[in-house]
Image (cartoon, grey):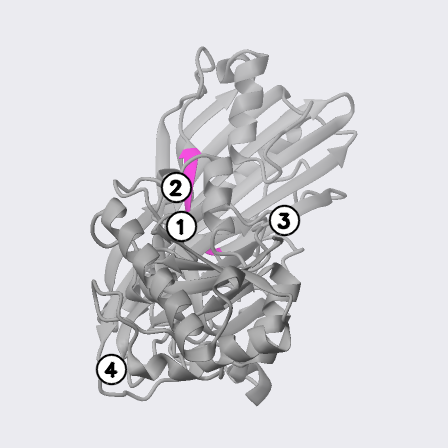
Amino acid sequence: MFSRTLSLLSHPVVLSFALISSPLYASYDQDHPLFAAYPNADLEQAKMYDYEKYTFPISIVDVSKEPYSFTRLDVVGDLYLHNYEIENVSSLKVYENYIVAAKQAGFKPLFSCALEACGDEDQAAALGTAIAVRGSVYNNYHNPYYWIGEKESPKGKVIAAWFFGAYEDMVSVQQVILETEPLETGLVKVDAAYAGQAAAPTSTEPLSADEKAKDNEMLPRYPGAKISQHKKMDTEVVTIPYAINATEKTPLQLTGDLTRHTYTIENVSTLKVYENYKNALTSAGFAFISQCELTQCGNEKQSSQLGEALAISGSVYNWYRNSYYLLAKKSLPTGNVYIALFIGAYESQVGVQQVIVQEKAVETGLVNVNADSLKQQLDAEGKALIYGIYFDTGKADIKAESKPTLDAIAELLKRNPDLLLYVVGHTDDTGDGASNVTLSGQRANEVVARLVKDYQVAAARLQAQGVGPYAPASSNTSDAGKQKNRRVELVKRLR
């Protein structure tokens, strides 16, 4: 652990320290171990991110055009941000004490500015805002000082930056410390046996049986993640978008077993979560169909809309910042598996929107059509969908296995002698539209003819109509969707 002796008064500062590895605090409301707060300073806000990308300014800010620009220092590592406020002291005194401490700790300056050298008021405010934990220095940009330095440590560089600004009798300190380190991967595990590969032993965070059961069997949660919402559905139609930067703009329409999750993770960056999921899916043999990172995912509105397309609630709330998105696919003997992930941040929390679809055709024949069920549909919706009347491709002759469904329709009409029906034929979108309208009409006429001939239903009670592919019940982009579109509907007639 760090050892330190730090007196930030007007005296020289003595500071000794030893760097620790992988710092991660469950609740971050404390000073950074390297630098204690200035005496009597109030800690206004602090954040910690386990492995994050960060951009430090190493020049004054050009505010002549938007977006504002400055010379950038882009670094990745464990990130700590603090904002302190101190009363009845000058920004000069606070600045001098911090910089003496930094230099005695072995930090070498990369850039600094003082007072007018930091630019005019707009430039000074923009410089402070660039590292402010709250995203603004508000009025605390008067009498500004800025300093950034770096130091080598056993595990990599440590970057430290401060902006000191005053307003009336208050000094505000913006402090950013970043400890570089290699990315820790392997935190997310794909169940290799489920994914069709040889299983390998894995270690996971201890979870209760109830919590484990909430995860998808293939892709357990990121360590320490908590479930905000989850949903599992047997055979559902799902729409999954491509990333904003993709050439393909038409979302995927998939049918299969569906699981959706919203996870939250504390004190970690979206980058680390994204890289671990990406590494896990790559190792499991998934191919990436579409992905975007940070600004590639669009502006805040576009990023939010991308996440909302996956979110169970239809909203990502505030989890749309520093966003990453990926859509991956793997072919298995049982069908294709698709995984979509949207990862976004709000303050020190990451939200993960996860959708997994195991493609499969809709299993039919589970419910027997009978007169009662048809009557319930007609009363509730004015129509009943019939999938139990079968035809050969391109033909209008009713196949023999359609008899139970025709029996049910005849029984419905017998029990309800005042009932009048349109018998409407539908097709999928394969082939020519006009030809499909003709074929669907022929099939509807054939159903009416069989009911009149074989069941002695009065012809005046039934009116046939074909609409071809023009009133689909599902998307035509999958076999399951086409299957839903090939149907006969019974629609109530008023006269």
The quarter of the displayed image where residue 486 is located: bottom left
Of mark 1 and mark 3, the one earlier in the sequence is 3
Horizontal arrangement in the rendering, residue 354 relative to residue 436 (left or right): right
Q: Which mark is residue 196?
A: 4
Of mark 4 and mark 3, the one earlier in the sequence is 3
Question: Could you tell me if residue 147 is visible in this image?
Answer: yes
Of mark 3 and mark 2, the one earlier in the sequence is 3
Mark closer to the observer (1, 4): 4
118 above or below 207? above
Three-letter code for the amino acid on which mark 4 is drawn? Gly
Q: Which residues fall within the magenta stretch?
A: 50-56
Q: CA distance from mark 1 to mark 4?
A: 27 Å
Residue named by callout 2: 297
**Residue 151 position within the rendered picture, expressed as x and y whole percent measured from the top left:** 39, 47
Q: CA distance from mark 4 to mark 3?
A: 45 Å
Three-letter code for the amino acid on which mark 1 is drawn? Tyr
Horizontal arrangement in the rendering, residue 474 relative to residue 33 (left or right): left
What residue is rendered at 59% in x and 13% in y?
Answer: 121
**Discs 2, 1 touching: Cβ within 8 Å:** yes
Residue named by callout 1: 324
Between 151 and 448, the one nearer to me in the picture: 448
Residue named by callout 3: 46
Of mark 1 and mark 4, the one earlier in the sequence is 4
Mark closer to the observer (4, 2): 4
Horizontal arrangement in the rendering, residue 365 relative to residue 127 (left or right): left
**Residue 457 position within the rendered picture, expressed as x and y whole percent measured from the top left:** 50, 72
